[in-house]
C-alpha cells in the first residue's frame, strides 16, 4: 500500500506570497492532519480534516487554512507568508489511532 | 496550555546498550500516549502506543512505561543499534480528540 505523499517536497517563497501544499493520504484513510515542524517550536498541530470537514484546529492565525476533497486528498494554504513560516510541513493520515506521516514539504520563506 | 515535554535533548549510547528516553506530560486527561521516531529527511514513524489505563506495553525491542502518578512516560530500546539513531518524540492524544500533542524530541545517537 502506498504511503502518504506530499508535494512539493521543497519550496522557496518570498514574504507576502502565498503557498499551497498538497497531501495524498493512504488509500482508505479519511482523516488527514497537518503539522508544522520548526527547530524552535517542534511539532505543532495545525488542523485535521475528516470527510471534507475540519474536525480540529490548532492555535495558528487565519493565514493558515486547509481543505479536504471527496477523495480525501488535502491541501493547506498559507497566505501573506512571513519569515517565521519557514518550516517543515507534515501531513499525516489515519484510519484509527496510528497516524502515518508523509515526508513533509520544506518551505523556506525569504 | 498544557504540553508534553522531554527531559534530555540528546542521548548518546554505544551499540548494544539499552536506551531509555523519558518524557514528562502535564495533561492527565489523555487517552493515548505514543512514541514516534523521526529519521533525517523523513516524517515521524509510529513506534508504539499505550493506553492511559495501562502501565506497560512491549513491542519488538521496545517497551513503553507509563507512570500516571508522576505523569511520566518512557521508551526503552533494547540492544540499541546504529539504525536506531534518530529523534524520538512522545505524543499524547487528549481525551475526546484525535490529534497529537508532541513533545520537543530527544535525539538518540548510537555509536558502533
Image: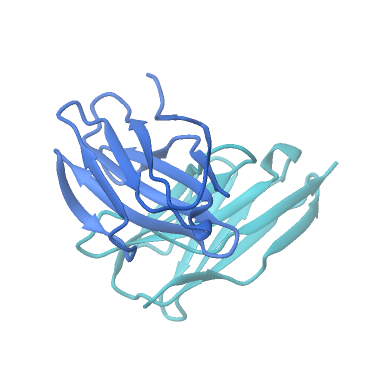
**In front here: B90 or A5?**
A5
x and y, in percent, of residue B98 in the image: 26, 54
B63 shown above or below A4? below
Query: Which colour denotes chain B?
Result: cyan
Residue B87 left/right relative to A52: right
Residue A10 left/right relative to A44: right
Image point (21%, 35%), residue name: A30
Residue B84 left/right relative to B34: right
Image point (59%, 66%), residue name: B22
Location of the N terminus of chain B by quadrant is bottom left
x and y, in percent, of residue B57 in the image: 45, 53
Tell me where residue B61 sits by quadrant.
top right
Residue B103 left/right relative to B31: right
**In front here: A61 or B54?**
A61
Image point (72%, 45%), residue name: B79
**In front here: B45 or A75?**
A75
As drawn, the chain in blue is A
Location of the C terminus of chain B by quadrant is top right
x and y, in percent, of residue A66 in the image: 26, 45
Residue A81 shows up from this direction: yes
Residue B100 shows up from this direction: no
The count of marks equals 0
Amino acid at each position: 500500500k502506498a504511503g502518504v505523499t506530499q508535494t512539493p517536497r521543497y519550496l522557496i517563497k518570498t514574504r507576502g506570497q502565498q503557498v499551497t501544499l498538497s497531501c495524498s493520504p493512504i488509500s482508505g484513510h479519511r482523516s488527514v492532519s497537518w503539522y508544522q515542524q520548526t527547530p524552535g517550536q517542534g511539532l505543532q498541530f495545525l488542523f485535521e480534516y475528516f470527510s471534507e470537514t475540519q474536525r480540529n484546529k490548532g492555535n495558528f492565525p487565519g493565514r493558515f487554512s486547509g481543505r479536504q476533497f471527496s477523495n480525501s486528498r488535502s491541501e493547506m494554504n498559507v497566505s501573506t507568508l512571513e519569515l517565521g513560516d519557514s518550516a517543515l510541513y507534515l501531513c499525516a493520515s489515519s484510519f484509527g489511532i496510528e497516524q502515518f506521516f508523509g515526508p513533509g514539504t520544506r518551505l523556506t520563506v525569504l | 496550555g498544557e504540553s508534553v515535554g522531554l527531559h534530555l535533548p540528546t542521548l548518546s549510547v554505544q551499540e548494544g546498550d539499552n536506551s531509555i528516553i523519558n518524557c514528562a506530560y502535564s495533561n492527565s486527561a489523555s487517552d493515548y500516549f505514543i512514541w514516534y521516531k523521526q529519521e533525517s529527511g523523513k516524517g515521524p514513524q509510529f513506534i508504539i502506543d499505550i493506553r492511559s489505563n495501562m502501565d506497560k506495553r512491549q513491542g519488538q525491542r521496545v517497551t513503553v512505561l507509563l507512570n500516571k502518578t508522576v505523569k511520566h512516560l518512557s521508551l526503552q530500546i533494547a540492544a540499541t543499534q546504529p539504525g536506531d539513531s534518530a529523534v524520538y518524540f512522545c505524543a499524547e492524544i487528549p481525551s475526546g480528540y484525535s490529534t497529537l500533542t508532541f513533545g520537543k524530541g530527544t535525539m538518540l545517537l548510537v555509536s558502533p
